Image (spheres, helix red, strand yellow):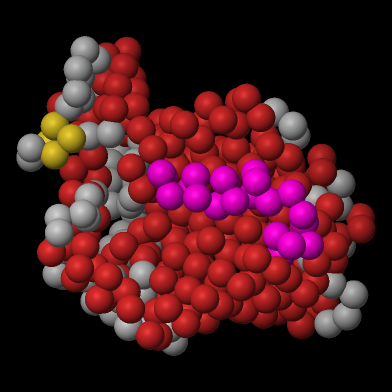
Amino acid sequence: MILLEAVFGIFFIFSCLEFVFFKYMSREMKLSLLLCPMAFVFVVAGFNTTSPDYLNYLQYISLSKLDGLSYVDEKLIEPFFSFTSALIYFITGDLKISYALFPVTSCFLISYVVFKKSPFFFLSMLIYLSHAYLNKELIQIRAGLISALLVFSVYLISEKKNIKSSILLIISPLIHFSASAQFIPLSFLHFMRNKVGLKSGVVVLVILSMIFSMSGAFEFIITFLSSVNLIPDVVNGYLGWDEYNYKLGLLNPVLLKGIFVFLLSLIILKTEIEHDVFVRYSWCLYAFGLFWLALFSDIAILAARISSIFSIFEIFLLSICLERIRYWRALLFMLISVYAVTTLFINLYIKDILSNIDLGLA
């Protein structure tokens, strides 16, 4: 764990230097600084064995098939994940390497887009390492991969490479079914041509989701749909997961933080949302995660699992806000840094999501 803390500390120091000397740091200089710490980030993501899901994923990979559908404990493994796992395992003959390629791919895609689109690379990576990296690349690797594919797809859309983006978006639900939710906001973005109207529509939908949640209508609808057997088995699986199926409420810290980032971006990036494709998609997708979290706040696991796919975009929004803000820039940088450090502390020492880091070299 000390090594992970050390790397986080390095990114924190580099993010401070990047902020102070922003005008003088070229992309080449940033690239030279990030190579060593990023190499460690990749290695830990790929080869850490202390994840609570590590052995389960090794079992998934070992049971995956090239010539048909694969099951674990009578549950279907999403076909693209199953086929890719089987293919890599067939080529390498090594379960650990087969596992490693998934989180390493996620880290690479995220860091590549951050390097291309974030004005403050090290600050964005600091936010990423404090939460998304720990929860996804080190634990829920399929959830991490679909988030990374979504980020990379948005990058491709901003570069007008729509065919490549469409292919990745179609693949995502075949890695993890929950990625199907991405087509809701993406369809909204595709058909909403009026950029000013789009902003207003997004704000209204987020507000309505909170009103809907407070009204208690969601519980009534779920009860009715269950009585007529109209709830899909996948959703029923979440509803029956009593250990995690508690109520989050509208005052939970994640939702409050999301509202702050959402409003901050709306105020500072109002012009960019209308004219910059990457910013517009990032803001709308982040808003959808907020919408989903509020709407399904009575079912914690369903709300958190889906909304976390879209929360990754905060690493871009906060960084771009910091670049665009005219006043109080130092204060905003301090707030973002404190947020990242606090989030890391909570994840490691209060939630204790990882007991240690072990690369399995012994």
User: Residue 238 placed where, x, y %?
Assistant: 22, 59
Residue at image location 41% in from the left, 71% down from the top? 295
Q: Nearer the viewer, residue 61 or 244?
A: 244
Give the quarter of the image for residue 43.
top left
Residue at image location 46% in from the left, 54% down from the top? 309
Residue at image location 63% in from the left, 65% down from the top? 202
Q: The N terminus is located in which quarter?
A: bottom left
Left or right: 116 as drawn, with respect to 49: right
Left or right: 237 as drawn, with respect to 302: left
User: Residue 38 placed where, x, y %?
Assistant: 58, 45
Give the quarter of the image for residue 70.
top left
User: Residue 133 placed where, x, y %?
Assistant: 46, 54
Reply above or below: 263 against 77.
below
Q: Is residue 121 visible?
A: no
Task: Check residue 300 for magenta coloring.
Answer: no
Q: Which residues are magenta?
A: 179-199
Q: The C terminus is located in which quarter?
A: top left
Q: Is residue 173 visible?
A: yes
